[in-house]
Amino acid sequence: MPPLVRTAGLSRHYSCGGTIVRAVSDVSLAIEHGDFVAIRGRSGSGKSTLMNLLGLLDRPDSGEYALNGREVAKLSEDGRATIRRHDIGFVFQVPALLPRATALENVELPLVYAGVPPSRRRRAAKEALERVGLADRGHHWPNQLSGGEQQRVVIARATVNDPALILADEPTGSLDSATSDEILSLFETLHHDGRTIIVVTHATDVADRARRQITLHDGRIIKDAQVAARNSPLNTAVLGSSP
Amino acid sequence: MRGLESLRIATRALRVNKLRSALTVLGIVVGVGAVVCMVSVGAGAQAEVSEKIRTLGANLLLVMPGARNSGGARLESGTQPTLTEEDAASIRRELVDVRVAAPLLSRSIPLVAANKNWVTVVAGINADYLVAREWQVADGRSFTSDEIVSGAKVAIVGSVIVEELFNGRTGPGETLRIGNVPFTVIGVLGKKGAGAAGRSQDDVVFIPLSAAKSRVLGAVRGTTREALDFISIKVSDATAMPEIERQIETLLRQRHRIRADAPSDFKIENPADILFARGAAVRLLGTLLIAVAAVSLVVGGISIMNIMLVSVTERTREIGLRMAVGASRRDIRWQFLIEALILSLMGGLVGAVSGAVAAVAIAWKAGWPILISPWAIVLACGFAGFIGISFGLYPAHRAARLDPIVALRFE
């Protein structure tokens, strides 16, 4: 089975006032199914651009990108939309919900574009909300939910279509530390359930929850290391149970 | 994504800004309303004209006495009693295409029947007049030629007279005093309704012309007993009417011995022409208003485009989010196109209803038949929808062309 994500020489340049900014430069990496990866780096290191490339929101200027064994770097905008719809779930820094839709409707959104019939859609959305502990909040409007709850709704939306890859960009960036902890635990649970997660962050405590840390500097990978499971009781339990 | 889903998203977005949506479609409302109203009013006016021409009798010409010159001042038309029964007879005799030339002499006179009275137009005619007007006797009979010649005291009355004087009795056989002279009613005319001037044509009493001259009207006119109000001429062929008009002119000038350079002492009118002219005036007004409506629709379209552009900008983040969770460009384009289409169709619907209401009000006020043209509604709403789509295309295209990353970061 090929790795879920494999890039080779992935590059993205911006032209800014005559100078070329290499936001992502010659990045080659492979991420296996079921991994929990943190992409670290200072602001301006190119980590968000890398996430946009991996999430097919952006197109690389050069290089190759195979998702689940399929070459996707040269896809058209609509081809990329189709992959985003079925294979990728996004969690953004600021909880991005449609203000005029209920929590449940927000969670349903990817299924709407996937053409899933309403009754099945509703059931799947309810299950996803249940998984993030918001089963009773389905009919609330986003402005009736706390920041942490909103981010959990976003996570429910990111997982509702059972994507191969979950991408999170500073998912705790706008939350207080207690709420951050809840959200991070939620990611760990998702990982434990076998999902592949890539978190982009500059915060050490977030990165420490991951199993693998990739550090970017000036658009290049300068460090790529497996993390010994230590902080999380869940990870300890998992490791402890293995022979 | 299914159309139904786009529809739901679009209606929700429009409901959020109710007032703004309502103001946006005002131009469309006015445009569609004006089209529906004017087409309906035009159709009503046209129907009214046709109906009047029908009741008038087809292919009719009227010859009326002209104005008299009195020391340089031109007096009112009809002040010179120049037309005679002999003129009518000679028109009938000399001109091939004239089917009938019916003389008429009339005046308002009080009527008395039993204990009721009523003032109406009493007209002396011969049987030709009813032919010219295509007027049937509904109950009873018409004049016999003996009655016409001898000036018998018999009358044919309109339906209004029956209602006003005979207390619901049928009419024929009743006695009617015209002035002081008793007449026997021999017939009741079929209904004609309002005439060109708006007065009921059924409020009338016809008696033989000879009786009118000798017994009722002739003496009081004070001029000559031969003078007529007008001669109604029925022409057998509509295309021959201008030619007949010319021939009558020549004939009567000869008979009246008018010098070549002198004006005629009579005039010839084609009442259908006058009605047609009035109908044409309404149609012209309608055409102008429809031009205004077209401008209004285009302006309405531009305001839809304007608001849709604002909406796209306002919802840039929403668009980015929808794209991130998998909306294709087509999905986004549809969402905004359908929104524009719904806006314009709502405007069209409101406009059609208010236009129809206005048309009913105008028709009611003017006494026209109410004719709401369904094809005008369909056409106007269709055009409104077309405007919505065409002016919604660019904003929808702009929304669909957004770069998801840029849209997501948009503040």
Image: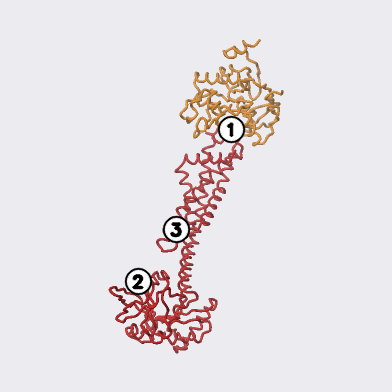
Chain colours: A orange, B red
The residue that label 3 is drawn on is B359
In which chain is the residue bearing label 3? Answer: B
Up/down of A175 relative to B200, above or below: above
Q: Residues within 10 Å of mark 2 (few under 14, many from 20)?
A: few
Name the secondary structure under disc 1: helix
Residue toward you, A225 or A220: A225
- Count of numbered marks: 3
Q: Chain of mark 2?
A: B
Element under disc 3: helix
The amino acid at mark 3 is Ala
Is mark 3 in CB contact (under 8 Å) with mark 2? no
Q: Give the spatial CA distance, label 2 vs label 1.
A: 81 Å
For residue A111, the mark is 1
Q: Position of residue B379 (x, y in %)?
A: 54, 55
Amino acid residing under circle 1: Leu
Residue kind at label 2, given as amino acid type: Arg
| Quadrant where the N terminus of chain A is found in the figure | top right
Label 2 residue SS? loop
